[in-house]
Image (cartoon, helix red, strand yellow):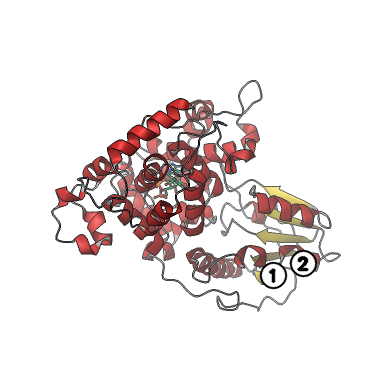
Amino acid sequence: MRQILWFRRDLRISDSALLHYAREDVLPLFIFDKNILDLLPRNDKRVSFIYQSVLSLKKQLQGLGLDLALFYGDPVEVLGSFVGEFDEVLCSCDFDAYAIKRDKEVEEFFPIRRFYDSFLIHPQEALKSDGTAYKVFTAFYKNLKPLWQSDSIEEYKISDTIKLSPYDYSFVPTLEDIGFEQQKLSDFLSESVDSLIAEFLPKLEKYQESRDYFALDGTSKLSTHLRFGLISPKQIFNQVKSYKNSEFFIRELFWREFYNSILYHFPYSQFENFNKKNILWNQNQEAFRAWCEGNTGVPIIDAGMQHLNATGEMHNRLRMVVASFLTKNLFLPWQWGAQYFALKLLDYETSSNVGSWQWGASTGADSVPYFRIFNPYTQSAKFDKEGIFIKSVLTELADVEPKLLHKENAEAIVNIKHSRAEAISKFKRV
Ligand SMILES: Cc1cc2nc3c(=O)[nH]c(=O)nc-3n(C[C@H](O)[C@H](O)[C@H](O)COP(=O)(O)OP(=O)(O)OC[C@H]3O[C@@H](n4cnc5c(N)ncnc54)[C@H](O)[C@@H]3O)c2cc1C
């Protein structure tokens, strides 16, 4: 059996379904996909992260006596050039609209064997007793109790029959060759997953209390590594499970599963309100630009957005606060915010992003009720009382007394109390 191992969002060698199901005579490859890359700006930070991760994967595979062939082009053409030389393509499942179309085209000339190793469960395996999908997280989670109560979940082992197919593996394009400039990434993004986990484990016990304080470093920061498969969710589960107070953290991993299940079963929700309510959002482009640029006059919003623009990162609590501000105070469509996050977030994942935006906009599955609206000033007073995060980004506010950062002022583009009341009355009408 001659197999192509097509690495995509699974850039690792441990708990790898591809390396487990590889038999003999394999061509491991990664394609820098022109169709995706050509749409991105030259300074896209994710491409720098993917590039460094692909080179690291190549090294790890070489350590196993294997290698990774690199390509820059259209995957259908690249794979098409191997017809007759290989019997099948092995790859990890990908459910976004482009990936589904691309894989269908490849399947016209190559059988594809897909593996579900980027998530803990396949959405088809987490259904209600009547065979329909869960729409509420708590019920979804409860149903999966046997899984999250287990001590560990079996990981894939590397097959011992793999033999590398002869090929010229020497081509390594530079970032410039594929149209991008090297971007500066935060140091933790160059750390190995093992060291990230080792740093996080001592914080795990206090995770539930500290995770919302965005000036503290209380979360795992694993989302980008998880997104591109440098670690699998199974591996994270297995590493944290035996630790004290790991339940709350594990529950967060299952939010990722829940949103994946929602997108899988309700693909329309990528673009439309999950609850199908017809909300007449404002269309104010100027207010949207101010939000994107972090220029709203509300310190916590501006610090969150400017930090996102500079680093590609944003703490979960800040994501919730800026999402609430956009959809409730500016009353702009959640789709605008979700699309902006899609351009900027290093850990961008369609399912988690869309699911979380709809949750915040009160249009989603298990969504926050429309009358629960975050007050950005109360949020910053609670979670960044001394203004440590805000001042680290908005350096021009360094000398401002912290409590003034949490007080509404005339410079803000919107009045929180009035806009809140207006949003509630608009929601009430639908
Ligand atoms: C508006 C909005 C958009 C978001 N977009 C994304 C996105 O595109 N990609 C993404 O990975 N996460 C997204 N999230 C969820 C969450 O903010 C990030 O997963 C988290 O901030 C990543 O940091 P961490 O790895 O330190 O998280 P930790 O707190 O350490 O959590 C561990 C892991 O659990 C998962 N997780 C945690 N919280 C959530 C959540 N609320 N929903 C789904 N999974 C969760 C992530 O995989 C995360 O890496 C979004 C949240 C909001 C409110």
Q: Is residue 216 visible?
A: no
> Which quarter of the picture shows residue 311?
bottom left
Outermost residue to the top? 130
In the rendered image, residue 248, in percent from the top left (x then y), is placed at 38, 36
Q: Quadrant of the N terminus?
A: bottom right
In the rendered image, residue 92, in percent from the top left (x then y), is placed at 65, 52
Q: Which mark is residue 77?
A: 2
Outermost residue to the right? 84
Q: Which mark is residue 73?
A: 1
Do the residues under discs 2 and 1 have CB atoms within 8 angstroms?
yes
Q: Front-most of 240 and 334?
A: 334
Kindly identify the residue that appears in the image at 48 percent across and 74 percent down. 182
Q: Front-most of 181 and 289?
A: 289
Where 345 sits versus 45, above or below?
A: above
Label 2, secondary structure: give it. Answer: helix
Q: Is residue 88 left or right of residue 136?
A: right
